[in-house]
Amino acid sequence: MVTRRILMRSLAVAVVIASVIWTITAEDIKVLNSCCRAVRTAEVADPIIGFRFQRESLPCVKAVIFETEWGNKQGIYFCSDPKQRWVREKVKQFLKQTPGFHTTPNIIY
């Protein structure tokens, strides 16, 4: 009877450890897989509070990801085509208005 109790406790501990590892791994996968898979050409009308560059690495496409005040509250980011003229202008305008802003830590690979 004592052996059976020890076995059941060991099994319960193993299940808890396995579920914790699985949960942590699943969260890491979400972060790694969140990327722009398509870009929009329509101009972002909301004020921009940040942006980051995304390199092409399938299924992710090359994009400039704009963060807006409204989108940030909603968890929505705007995936924009870096070839669009308005995108380049928005980036330049934002960098002029925000001295000291660095995009390097925000690059998504």
Image: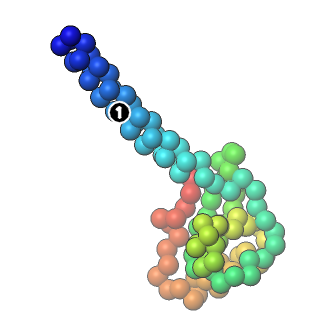
Residue 87: quarter of image: bottom right
Up/down of 60 relative to 52, above or below: above
Q: Nearer the viewer, residue 65 or 26?
A: 26
Instruction: Kindly identify the amino acid type of the residue bearing the numbered disc 1.
Output: Val
The percent position of residue 99, horizontal first and vertical second, equals 50, 86
Q: Residue furthest left?
A: 2
Residue 15: quarter of image: top left
Q: Could one spot residue 60 in this view of the protein? A: yes
Badge 1 is on which residue? Answer: 16
The image quadrant where one finds the N terminus is top left
Residue drawn at 43 percent across, 43 percent down:
24
Residue drawn at 29 percent across, 19 percent down:
8
Q: Residue furthest front?
A: 1
Residue drawn at 25 percent across, 12 percent down:
4
Residue drawn at 49 percent across, 74 percent down:
102
The percent position of residue 72, horizontal first and vertical second, equals 58, 72
The percent position of residue 109, horizontal first and vertical second, equals 57, 53
Left or right: residue 81 compared with residue 8 = right
Left or right: residue 46 compared with residue 13 = right
Considering the numbered disc 1 on the image, is that residue within a helix, a strand or a loop? helix
Q: Nearer the viewer, residue 81 or 14?
A: 14
Q: Residue furthest right?
A: 42
Left or right: residue 28 compared with residue 60 = left
Q: Nearer the viewer, residue 57 or 19?
A: 19
Q: Could one spot residue 67 in this view of the protein? A: no
